[in-house]
């Protein structure tokens, strides 16, 4: 089965060339032509995402920020005419896997894409990271900031018992003994923002 790549690019000619090269290399390509259309596609499963930084409606950095906030570790490669240091630093902080600078060198694009896919492929026998609900991520984010269950309950407007229920579920999913171990594991796995 071919790997699915989401290509978010507003320049139709570039998107068409990227798709042609990737399909020829054996990938299945799904295209989006703006930030908002890319955002609607982020909920689907992809093996990697290629995304322009400058997009109408929402930038590639915004899309990367949204993807990582959802806990997704899908490889993300920015395709950009702006190789500026500030963009690269911000993108790396957000969890970008690599960059391709326009005009696109398609041989380099395939090498980068294959590299990020190989690096992000789970090793044989390595379990996939657990899936957390939105509420579990929210609670663990507060745990990682040192908040007590009572504090978290007040902040989120839920009962302390509900907070403890979510913490216990995450501890079981991660097979850890303490709430702080769960928070640290979630941070390391990118399941909650740092």
Image (cartoon, rainbow, N blue to C red):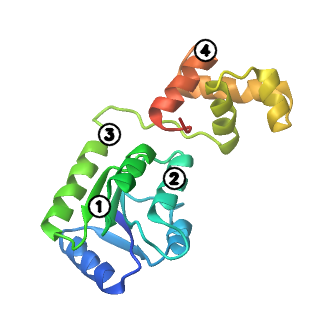
Alpha-carbon neighbours of circle 4 within 10 Å: few (<14), some, or many (≥20)?
Answer: few
Which comes before the other along the chain, label 3 or label 2? Answer: 2
| Cβ atoms under marks 2 and 4 closer than 8 Å | no
Residue found farthest to the top: 177
Residue 99 picture location, percent across and down: 28, 57
Residue position marked by numbered label 1 in the rendering: 83
Residue 125 tag number: none
Counting residues from the N terminus, which is met first, the one under dot 4 or under dot 1?
1
Pair 2/4: label in front: 2
Q: For the residues marked 2 and 1, what is the alpha-carbon distance in whole angstroms?
A: 18 Å
State the image coordinates of residue 86 (x, y, percent, origin top left): 38, 53
Front disc: 2 or 1: 1
Q: Closer to us: mark 3 or mark 2?
A: 2
Query: Disc 3 or disc 4, which is closer to the eye?
Result: 4
CA distance separating discs 3 and 4: 26 Å
Q: Nearer the viewer, residue 47 or 87?
A: 87
Where is residue 114? Give x, y as percent.
21, 55
Residue appearing at x 34%, y 72% in the figure: 29
Which quadrant of the view contains residue 3? bottom left
Question: Cα distance, mark 3 to mark 2?
Answer: 23 Å
Q: Residue at x 37, y 50 (%)?
A: 96
Mark 2 and mark 4 lie on one chain; the one further toward the N terminus is 2
Image point (46%, 73%), residue name: 55
Q: Quadrant of the N terminus?
A: bottom left
Query: Which mark, by number, is residue 122?
Result: 3
Where is residue 149, by image quadrant? top right
Mark 4, secondary structure of its residue: loop
Residue 178: assigned label? 4
Asked if the residue at tag 4 contacts the one at tag 3, i.e. Cβ–Cβ closer than 8 Å, the answer is no
Residue labelled with disc 2: 65
* Left or right: 151 as drawn, with respect to 178: right
């Amino acid at each position: 089965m071919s790997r699915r790549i989401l290509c978010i690019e507003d320049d139709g000619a570039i998107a068409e060339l990227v798709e042609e090269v990737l399909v020829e290399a054996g990938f299945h390509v799904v295209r989006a032509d703006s930030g908002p259309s890319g955002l609607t596609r982020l909920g689907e499963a992809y093996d990697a995402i290629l995304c322009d930084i400058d997009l109408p409606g929402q930038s590639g950095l915004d899309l990367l920020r949204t993807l990582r906030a959802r806990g997704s570790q899908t490889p993300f490669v920015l395709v950009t005419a702006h190789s500026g240091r500030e963009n690269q630093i911000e993108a790396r902080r957000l969890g970008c896997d690599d960059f391709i600078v326009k005009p696109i060198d398609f041989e380099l694009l395939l090498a980068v894409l294959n590299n990020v896919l190989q690096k992000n492929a789970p090793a044989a026998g390595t379990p996939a990271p657990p899936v957390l609900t939105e509420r579990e991520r929210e609670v663990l984010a507060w745990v990682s900031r040192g908040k007590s269950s009572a504090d978290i309950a007040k902040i989120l407007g839920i009962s302390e018992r509900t907070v403890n229920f979510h913490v216990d579920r995450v501890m079981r999913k991660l097979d850890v003994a303490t709430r702080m171990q769960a928070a640290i594991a979630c941070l390391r796995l990118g399941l909650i923002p740092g």
